[in-house]
């Protein structure tokens, strides 16, 4: 069993980000959510801190530790989910490039993401297929010197600011998941356009947009990984990165508790502080217990990644951490809104944005139903029909 503890390096990262989050990020959080505008100032702040490199291997300037990335994500998400997302967007295609890329691609793209000189998106989802990745229809055909890509995508986050896009498409005529390959598209390629951004419930500060491919020429050097290895690279990338999504959710739950505690300590009914009612204390105690359990699961799954665990075992434990932490975030943030009374419904108060952002975490990076399928398959094998 992989155990974990936060070492001095993790604690230093935690202290630094906690301080910056409180002083510089928190004052911007509500405005980013309300306006729905991409927070370029937050990108510049994080770039200046040099924290985009955190999960990258040491040769690309990072710590090589997903646990470090989780600690940082938790602290940022605790005050501003959108600023946390700005950081995590730098890590979106990281797993796929690390697992599928050649040395030249890793050097160019991982280095650029790590320093913040490049921004990127990863785009798999299509109108007819989200969870069912194998159902994508975007298609690449071989052409002299490369490929011609046709099709479309939806929900591509970071699209309006990305310099490059890791895109999943089927190659040739095969329609199975074995045909899925990954291609790196660069901004401005002929025939490649980014559509209008979604108006979203949560995660409002980062643009999620459709992409359109009209016979886009992609040079051979821009295919990621060997032919037919795309699906594997995406899945391995997602598994290794899932604890970070859980960490975002832990941060949301903790941030909602911080706000709720402050509120009930200063609110009176019938001449009694709301925080002095036992019913309220038990609610907050449950919220704290669930958040702490989620935190431990996330840190442990991250430590499994750092210890080199892969395959179905990692998929199951990372899935448990992601699904549990994001379900906890949904429950805890909803309870926090309840504790605020009517103030919780006002868009002038900070609390309902935590609840809206928590909803997003149950859906992205593999919905929580899909995580439960992965866990069930690990426990029981894949479902079978009697023959
Ligand atoms: C804010 C946001 C940002 C996103 N960013 C990106 C991005 O950058 N790149 C990208 O590629 N995608 C992105 N997505 C898309 C996201 O990955 C998909 O929305 C997600 O995979 C679910 O797919 P879907 O919405 O098509 O739902 P569907 O797959 O259609 O599922 C609908 C419902 O059915 C459930 N369901 C489906 N199949 C099963 C099953 N076998 N068993 C049980 N339940 C099932 C699902 O859990 C869900 O509740 C983003 C989404 C959001 C909301």
Image: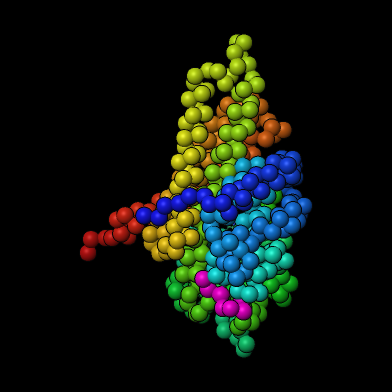
Colouring of the image: rainbow
Q: Main secondary structure of the magenta part?
A: helix
Q: Which image quarter: residue 114? A: bottom right
Residue 209: give x, y in percent of width and height.
Answer: 66, 58
Q: Is residue 340 above or below residue 136?
A: above
Q: Nearer the viewer, residue 79 or 202?
A: 79
Residue 228: give x, y in percent of width and height.
Answer: 47, 77
Q: Nearer the viewer, residue 324 or 63?
A: 63
Question: Do we see residue 360 in this rendering?
Answer: no
* Residue 101 among those drawn in magenta: yes
- Quadrant of the frame with the C terminus: bottom left
- Quadrant of the frame with the N terminus: bottom left
* Residue 180 among those drawn in magenta: no
User: Is residue 246 left or right of 386 when viewed as pictured?
Assistant: right
Q: Nearer the viewer, residue 155 or 174?
A: 155
User: Is residue 325 left or right of 16 when viewed as pictured?
Assistant: left
Give, as a single range, the part of the protein colored magenta.
99-105
Residue at the left extreme of this rendering: 387
Which residue sits at x=66%, y=70%? 111
């Amino acid at each position: 069993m992989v155990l974990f503890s936060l070492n001095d390096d993790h604690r230093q990262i935690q202290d630094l980000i906690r301080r910056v989050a409180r002083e510089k990020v928190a004052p911007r959080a509500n405005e980013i959510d309300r306006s729905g505008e991409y927070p370029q100032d937050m990108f510049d702040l994080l770039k200046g801190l040099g924290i985009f490199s955190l999960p990258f291997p040491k040769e690309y300037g990072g710590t090589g530790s997903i646990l470090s990335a989780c600690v940082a994500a938790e602290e940022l998400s605790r005050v501003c989910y959108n600023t946390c997302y700005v950081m995590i967007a730098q890590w979106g295609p990281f797993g796929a490039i690390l697992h599928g890329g050649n040395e030249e691609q890793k050097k160019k793209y991982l280095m650029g993401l790590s320093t913040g000189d490049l921004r990127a998106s990863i785009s798999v989802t299509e109108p007819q297929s989200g969870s069912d990745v194998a159902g994508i229809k975007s298609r690449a055909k071989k052409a002299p010197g490369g490929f011609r890509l046709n099709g479309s995508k939806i929900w591509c986050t970071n699209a309006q600011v990305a310099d490059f896009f890791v895109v999943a498409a089927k190659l040739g005529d095969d329609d199975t998941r074995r045909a899925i390959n990954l291609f790196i598209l660069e901004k401005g390629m002929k025939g490649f356009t980014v559509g209008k951004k979604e108006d979203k419930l949560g995660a409002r500060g980062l643009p999620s947009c459709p992409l359109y491919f009209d016979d886009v020429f992609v040079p051979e050097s821009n295919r990621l990984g060997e032919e037919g290895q795309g699906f594997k690279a995406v899945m391995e990338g997602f598994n290794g990165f899932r604890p970070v999504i859980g960490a975002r959710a832990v941060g949301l739950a903790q941030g909602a508790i911080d706000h709720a505690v402050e509120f009930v300590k200063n609110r009176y009914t019938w001449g009694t502080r709301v925080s002095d009612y036992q019913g309220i204390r038990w609610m907050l105690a449950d919220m704290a217990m669930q958040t702490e359990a989620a935190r431990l699961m996330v840190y442990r799954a991250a430590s499994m990644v750092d210890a080199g665990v892969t395959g179905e075992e990692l998929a199951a434990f990372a899935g448990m951490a992601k699904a549990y932490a994001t379900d906890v975030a949904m429950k805890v943030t909803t309870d926090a809104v309840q504790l605020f009374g009517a103030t919780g419904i006002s868009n002038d108060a900070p609390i309902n944005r935590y609840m809206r952002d928590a909803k997003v975490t149950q859906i992205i990076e593999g919905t929580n139903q899909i995580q439960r399928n992965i866990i069930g398959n690990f426990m029981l094998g894949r479902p079978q029909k009697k023959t």
